[in-house]
Image: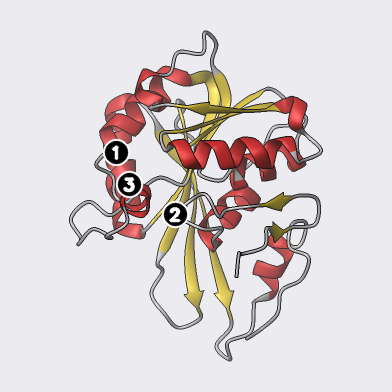
Amino acid sequence: MERAPFQFKQFAVDDKGYAMKVGTDGVLLGAWANVPRDGRFLDIGTGCGLIALMLAQRSLAHIAAIEIENDAIQQSEQNFKNSHWADRLTAIEGAVQQYNPGSKFNLIVSNPPFFSNSLKAPEKQRSAARHNDTLPPEALLYAVDKLLSTDGIFAFILPVQEAQSLIAIAQSYHLYLNRSCLVFSKEGKQPNRLMGELSRSEYTLIQETLCIRTIDGKYSQAYRNLTEPFYLMLKDV
């Protein structure tokens, strides 16, 4: 049976054309990142367009969403057309390293591929989405440095080890961590994700934590508060 589009409060995401389906990482980043009221935003590796749609809901900005996979970009383009913000969302097929829009962005976000040394998935699309062969950290940061405005923010989500590596490399591009959030899938476990915001200025680091589920397996109030503007409902299972 064909999977129905994932219905959020103000938009729907059809992800059947994309190997990596709607997931918690994208929702977390789209909800957590500091989002200016307007300007020009860029979503790197948009996939089915989830984060770009969340940014559109949270702002009045014009949002470019770039993706290297043809099937995924067609899917995101359709999701944008079906949303309330079609006039502010643009899907772009291609590698961000070669992207030259002519002007810079005051917010760049990315839920990038992250498995560099693990066994690759058999499906070509899923493998490309999860492995960083096509977008290693240096290439991602090179693109961010080229495309980010002087006072812009780059927000990302990665597994903790990969995030720490990205943060270290970013300093060579004069991009500095100003805000971070360690994400715990459940109270009592080790953090499995890190969200971060980089900018061209060094500020006092704001450090946050977020537990998705409490010790008894229920969604935490903090996670509910963060995602409430988007999810229709959160059911504890």
- Disc 1 and disc 3: Cα gap in Å? 15 Å
The kind of residue on which mark 2 rests is Ala
| Residue 1 position (above or below residue 109) | below
- Disc 2 and disc 1: Cα gap in Å? 22 Å
Q: Quadrant of residue 103?
A: top right
Q: Is the C-beta separation of discs 2 and 3 under 8 Å?
A: yes
**Residue 137: numbered disc:** 1
Q: Secondary structure at mark 2?
A: loop
Q: Residue at position x 34%, y 53% from top?
A: 130
- Which dot, 2 or 1, sits closer to the camera? 2
- Which dot, 1 or 3, sits closer to the camera? 3
Q: Residue furthest bottom?
A: 216
Q: Left or right: where does residue 37 sit relative to residue 155?
A: right
**Residue 128: numbered disc:** 3
Q: Residue 197 in the image: state x and y as whole percent.
A: 49, 41
The kind of residue on which mark 1 rests is Pro
Q: Residue 129 in the image: state x and y as whole percent.
A: 38, 49
Q: Which residue is mark 2?
A: 19
